[in-house]
Image (tube, helix red, strand yellow):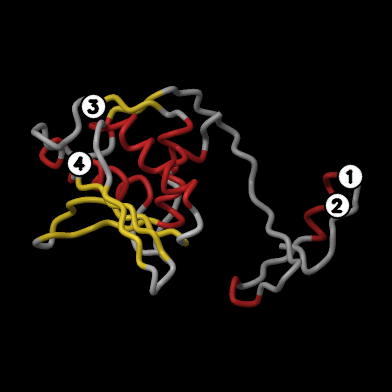
Amino acid sequence: LCKGKKYKHKKCNDIKSFLEWIKISNLKEKDYVALPIPNKINNIDFINIYDYVPKDLVKWEKNHIKTEIIPLNKSFLGLLGLYLAEGNIIYRNKKESGIEFTFNIKEENLVKFVKNSVKELFNLNCNVYKRLDRHTSTVIFNNKSIANLFKILGGEYSHYKTIHKDFMELS
């Protein structure tokens, strides 16, 4: 991490002497974070849900996924990114039952993106609820299998969410 300074050294060897460890609680505006460059790149176009979700958690019935192959396209990766930022798992009877996204009421483009992506990828419809008192739009779709997939790929609860290691190395 660099404290409030731009790195100006031209030689790569100089960067180690310029960086220091700082607790995240001590970060300030204009500090920089150094991240490693992945030394491995995964060039994959799709995932198989069974590579991530145990078979007993994948449901093949009405209102559930129709295929185990999911393309790693703009729709899926964008949906996963929005889940990490604005989504959460819905529980019924202590079991995952769906996913909910909450946006500012003015972010109609994100509501539309989620609805279209869920329809394209999983052939599911979303419900949208507007709460004028909170200035929010909530997009919900119910699907246990996809909820389990997103929980495994991104975690849950804002302070525990993370990008799955397989997705950190995508090209």
User: Which quadrant of the rendered structure holds the C terminus?
Assistant: top right
Q: Which residue is mark 1?
A: 11
As drawn, the residue found furthest toward the bottom would be 26
Q: Nearer the viewer, mark 4 or mark 1?
A: 4
Q: Position of residue 115 (x, y in %)?
A: 35, 41
Sequence-first disc among 4 and 1? 1
Label 3, label 1: how far apart the Cα atoms are: 48 Å
Q: Are marks 4 and 1 in contact (CB under 8 Å)?
A: no
The span from disc 2 to disc 4 (Cα, nearest Å) is 49 Å
Q: Are marks 3 and 1 in contact (CB under 8 Å)?
A: no
Label 4: which residue?
145
Residue 28, given in percent of the width and then of the height, sits at 70, 73
- Few, some or many residues within 10 Å of mark 3 (<14, 14–19, 20+): few
In the image, taking residue 58 as reference, residue 51 lies left or right, namely: right
Crowd class of label 2 (few under 14; some 14 to 19; many from 20; radius 10 Å) = few
Residues at marks 2 and 3, CA–CA distance in whole angstroms: 48 Å
Q: Are marks 4 and 3 in contact (CB under 8 Å)?
A: no
Residue indicated by mark 2:
14
Q: Secondary structure at mark 2?
A: helix
- Please identify the quarter of the rendering in which residue 52 is found: top left
- Circles 2 and 1 in contact, beta carbons < 8 Å: yes
- For disc 3, the marked residue is 68
